[in-house]
Image (spheres, rainbow, N blue to C red):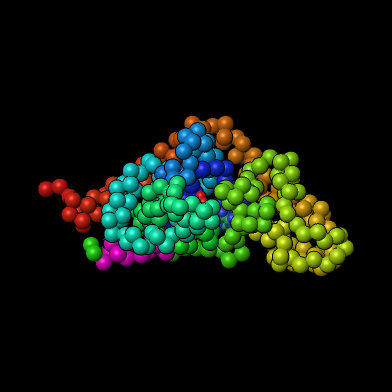
Amino acid sequence: KQTVLTGITTTGTPHLGNYVGAIRPAIAASKDANVAPFYFLADYHALIKCHEPEKVRQSSLEIAATWLALGLDTSNAVFYRQSDVPEIMELTWMLTCVTAKGLMNRAHAYKASVADNEHNGENDADKGISMGLFSYPVLMAADILMFNAHKVPVGKDQIQHIEMARDIAARFNHIYGEHFVLPEAIIDANTATLSGLDGRKMSKSYNNTIPLFEPEKKLKKLINKIKTNSQEPGEPKDPTDCTLFSIYQAFATAEEIAAIKQRYADGIGWGDMKQQLFELINTHVAPAREHYDELMQKPQHIEEQLQEGARKARAISVPFIKQLREAVGISRIA
Ligand code: TYM
């Protein structure tokens, strides 16, 4: 069986980008009998970006409810919280000790923070950057390697992290013997980077997201806020340079895409196109949204599912970390 693994950081409400980049392909993969699915809430990762405990707690609940509402079958998938598997923390340290600092210097998230500081005229390029942020890719490598994942469905922004996980795994294997599978990213070319309200990548940090299960009226309002150019109805329009179209195609069938392209050529008005997009997304999410609203009223049920997932995860991580302890020379005398 192929192990497919992915996680979402628990720092906000799941949005359409998370859905098309990671959750939708992951749920599709979980229906394949040849796949062993491992999906988790990256709550240790949340502490890197968010020091508001209530926000992290609420986000964990929302993300868990999202996976369940979308029909994740937890009798097949191992669905767990990262923090319920302390072996991941232990593995993080083992990996930290074989990871070159130079590799971390090249990580996008770290480099972006340094660039921000420089842009803002800071004397200290590392100002406000924690060790958590700096070594974030090592924790992510531990998530992936703990369960020897073959495939990791993610959006494009995570590719570098998967490549780093491969590098780190190869380094560990080279020193201590073949313990880890080298993981590969699964990226859907059409939805690798979903655009947000302002046309930039949809991201919690840009404040431009459309939450996946936004109530219908709010969803409509948000879609009406998507930025467009100033072309008038009747003017032929270019779908390739249009945020509305790029989001539309992440949810539409091939026929729907062809039909809407024709309407662009015929000069569809932006108001009309926003209505089309709203209807498409709303129809797509409505059944799961109802289920989500119900689940959010049953945190106890969610907790039970996660604890069951933690038991299944630890049945693997506990013996594996023992093997790794032996490999690195910190095992106990028999
Ligand atoms: P996070 O929480 O930022 O995002 C979760 C997933 O959603 C994808 N994504 C997008 N895909 C397409 N278009 C977008 N606009 C968009 N925005 C977000 C992300 O690529 C990601 O797949 N470090 C990870 C979480 C993580 C993880 C892991 C993932 C921790 N350990 C191990 C895979 C394997 C993160 O912060 O993702």
Judge from the rendering whether residue 32 lies leftward or rightward of residue 248; answer left or right. left
**In front of the other: 97 or 185:** 97
Q: Residue at x 35, y 56 (%)?
A: 145
Q: How many marks?
A: 0
Q: Is residue 166 magenta?
A: yes
Can residue 291 be seen in this snapshot? yes
Q: Residue furthest right?
A: 234
Q: Residue at x 75, y 57 (%)?
A: 228
Question: Residue 51: percent from the left, percent from the top?
Answer: 46, 38
Q: Residue at x 22, y 52 (%)?
A: 325
Judge from the rendering whether residue 226 lies leftward or rightward of residue 192; answer left or right. right
Residue extent of the magenta highlight? 161-174
**In front of the other: 123 or 135:** 123
SS assignment for the magenta stretch, majority? helix
Displayed quadrant of residue 97:
bottom left
Q: Residue at x 64, y 39 (%)?
A: 290
Can residue 37 be seen in this snapshot? no
Judge from the rendering whether residue 88 lies leftward or rightward of residue 80; answer left or right. left
Question: Residue 182: percent from the left, percent from the top?
Answer: 37, 64
Question: Residue 274: percent from the left, percent from the top?
Answer: 77, 53
Judge from the rendering whether residue 44 lies leftward or rightward of residue 32; answer left or right. left
Question: Residue 18: percent from the left, percent from the top?
Answer: 56, 52
**In front of the other: 254 or 73:** 254
Question: Quarter holding the N terminus?
Answer: bottom left
